[in-house]
């Protein structure tokens, strides 16, 4: 149900190959090299060593240059590898692809969905209780926080996803479907085509931020995978640092996804009129007819992909000037 919105993050609109986490990759490898030298001081010199690094460094005037080129290649390669994996990872995190996987994946997905439903209900109840009980300024702040966190979830259990990011996208998709009758899976691409340059630029910036956070998560996971390369005393601190970074990047991913969802909601509400006009459908006459008009637009767009034309809506093309 939110595939169109999830693809909006990972498709070329986001210019994902330019939104690479080069800084995070460079920080990872620099920290790994420094910790390696700290853990093994003898590795900082090449006296009597026949390691590949020392052999390259002592191969002649080009040795240091080759090492620098290898270091740059490691940093850039890691960043671009994360950029290449990110679209598939983010799609898996936010769509219903898990329903078509094996039994263990479906079981885990259903378990996570139930967990998110319980958390949504708990946050909604806490926000309602704090708001009705008063409790001064502190109670009001707690009620606002609980309500904001609950807003990340769709109201209908059928829309709930196994991940936080999936629920944020599902929540905005559900609101637009319920209140405006628009299915973003089919409406999104025509809407993007009708967006002005300023609106498109804001969506690009928001989607790039989402992708960069997702890439940072992958790089932090790579860092955790390097833990066995260090002595255990240093490996503990390395793993702890990577775990803290992973949690921070995960929190940032949810926040950036939330910001992207708000941008999507604003774009749809503000720029939906050109889409109606582009397909010759009448604009909603009032808020009461908003949902019916949106359902007519969604049905018309679907008719161009599969099935026959929907019954009811009539074209209302603007006069040719």
Image: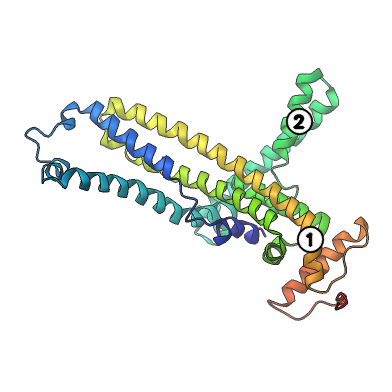
In front of the other: 17 or 114? 17
The quarter holding residue 296 reads bottom right
- Crowd rating for badge 2 (residues with CA inside 10 Å; few <14, some 14–19, many 20+): some
Residue displayed at 28% across by 35% down: 33
SS under mark 2: helix
Can you give x and y, in whole percent of width and height, for residue 313 in the image? Answer: 87, 74
Which residue is label 2 attached to? 144
SS under mark 1: helix
Figure check: 45 above or below 1: above
Nearer the observer: mark 2 or 1; the answer is 1
Query: What is the quadrant of the N terminus in the image?
Result: bottom right
For marks 2 and 1, the one nearer the N-term is: 2
- Crowd rating for badge 1 (residues with CA inside 10 Å; few <14, some 14–19, many 20+): some
Residue displayed at 12% across by 44% down: 55
Can you give x and y, in whole percent of width and height, for residue 272 in the image? Answer: 79, 61
In front of the other: 236 or 64? 64
Residue 224 appears in view: no
Which residue is label 1 attached to? 272
**Pointer 2 with pointer 1, Cβ within 8 A:** no
Residue 77 appears in view: yes
Q: Residue lying farthest bottom?
A: 308
Can you give x and y, in whole percent of width and height, for residue 266 in the image? Answer: 75, 50
> How many dots with numbers?
2
Query: What is the quadrant of the C terminus in the image?
Result: bottom right
């Amino acid at each position: 149900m939110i595939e169109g919105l999830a693809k909006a993050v990972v498709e070329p609109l986001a210019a994902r190959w330019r939104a690479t986490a080069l800084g995070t990759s460079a920080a990872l490898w620099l920290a790994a090299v420094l910790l390696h030298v700290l853990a093994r001081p003898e590795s900082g010199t090449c006296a009597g060593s026949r390691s590949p690094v020392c052999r390259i460094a002592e191969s002649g005037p080009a040795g240091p240059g080759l090492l620098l080129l290898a270091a740059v290649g490691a940093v850039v390669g890691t960043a671009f590898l994360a950029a290449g994996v990110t679209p598939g990872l983010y799609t898996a995190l936010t769509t219903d692809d898990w329903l078509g996987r094996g039994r263990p994946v479906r079981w885990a997905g259903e378990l996570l969905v139930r967990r998110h439903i319980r958390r949504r209900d708990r946050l909604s109840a806490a926000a309602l209780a704090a708001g009705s009980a008063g409790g001064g300024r502190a109670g009001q702040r707690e009620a606002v926080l609980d309500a904001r966190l609950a807003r990340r979830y769709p109201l209908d259990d059928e829309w709930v996803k196994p991940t936080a990011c999936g629920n944020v996208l599902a929540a905005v998709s559900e609101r637009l479907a319920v209140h405006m009758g628009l299915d973003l899976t089919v409406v999104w691409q025509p809407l993007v085509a009708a967006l002005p340059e300023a609106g498109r630029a804001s969506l690009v910036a928001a989607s790039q931020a989402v992708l960069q956070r997702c890439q940072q998560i992958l790089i932090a996971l790579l860092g955790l995978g390097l833990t066995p390369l260090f002595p255990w005393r240093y490996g503990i601190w390395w793993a702890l640092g990577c775990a803290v970074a992973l949690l921070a990047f995960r929190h940032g991913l949810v926040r950036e996804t939330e910001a992207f969802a708000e941008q999507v909601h604003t774009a749809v509400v503000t720029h939906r009129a050109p889409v109606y006009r582009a397909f010759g459908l009448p604009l909603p006459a009032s808020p009461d007819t908003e949902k019916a008009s949106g359902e007519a637009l969604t049905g018309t767009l679907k008719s161009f992909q599969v099935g026959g034309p929907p019954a009811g809506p009539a074209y209302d093309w603007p006069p040719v000037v």
